[in-house]
Image: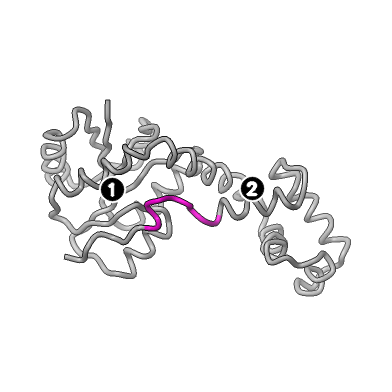
Amino acid sequence: MQTVSLLDSDEGRRQSIWRELRQIYANVQPYDSLTELSAHWPKGSPLIVHDKDNVVEDVINAMYDRGEWNPIVVFHEEISPSRIVDSLFQGVIDYYRWPFSSTELSERIQRFFVDEAGLVEQNLRVSAARKKLSLLTEREHQVLNKMIEGATSKEIARELGISHRTVEVHRRAIIGRLKVRSAVDVVRIAVEGAFRLTAQAQTEPAELR
């Protein structure tokens, strides 16, 4: 059974959207806060989120902290191109102006269900990579960034103003924290964590209407 979850702190609007979505989906789960959502996290199902304050970022961070991935559709009364770009970069699959057509929204969500298996697998890898990368210290992130650029340990030491020996210590620590065997595996995880390679991320945002 296809499940869709809705996160919106405005009770009236939440009920209105819930009623419309219930005409399309048998199971629509409404939540009024991230706290409530986190207590009953909908594994793998699409999330429709009202963009208020930092809630979208908080939802995405909570999702990756859990090692989960959910396709997220965001909506707001007023939208701007810069906000849409920021949201899509964070991993949101689409952005709508409220009020929106439930039919149009449903068509967007249905595209996820068609490609569900592949997209979930891809994004779970991203989620796992980001969770591992979050364990690194600030200095280890700096060293990792230089490794991604292809810099040698001597070059990293020179650019960061630290000794060659210290760089080697950080490289070993990074490999240990990420639980991999080589620098090649480290770079692979870094790339997976930095870029969300989803079919949705390559699509254009909803029309600014």
Instruction: Work out which quarter of the rendered image holds the N terminus and state it.
Output: top left
Depth order, front residue of 180/116: 116
Query: Which kind of residue does numbered mark 2 sit on?
Result: Leu
Whole-percent x and y of residue 76? 22, 57
- Residue at image position (29%, 43%) is 111
Note whether 68 is above or below 49 in the view shown. above
Q: In the rendered structure, which segment of residues is drawn in magenta?
A: 194-202
**Hey, which quadrant is residue 131 in on the image?**
top right
| Amino acid type, residue under disc 1 in the picture | Val
In magenta segment, residue 200: yes
Tell me, for residue 18, which label it has, or none.
Answer: none
Q: Which residue is mark 2?
A: 135
Q: Nearer the viewer, residue 90 or 77?
A: 90
Q: Is residue 24 magenta-colored?
A: no
- Name the residue at 29% across, 49% down: 73
At x 38%, y 37%, the residue is: 116
Image quadrant occupied by the C terminus: bottom left
Q: Which residue is mark 1?
A: 49
Residue 34 in picture, x, y percent from top left: 34, 42
List x then y, in percent, for residue 9.
23, 46
Mark 2 Cα within 10 Å, few/some/many (few <14, many 20+)?
few
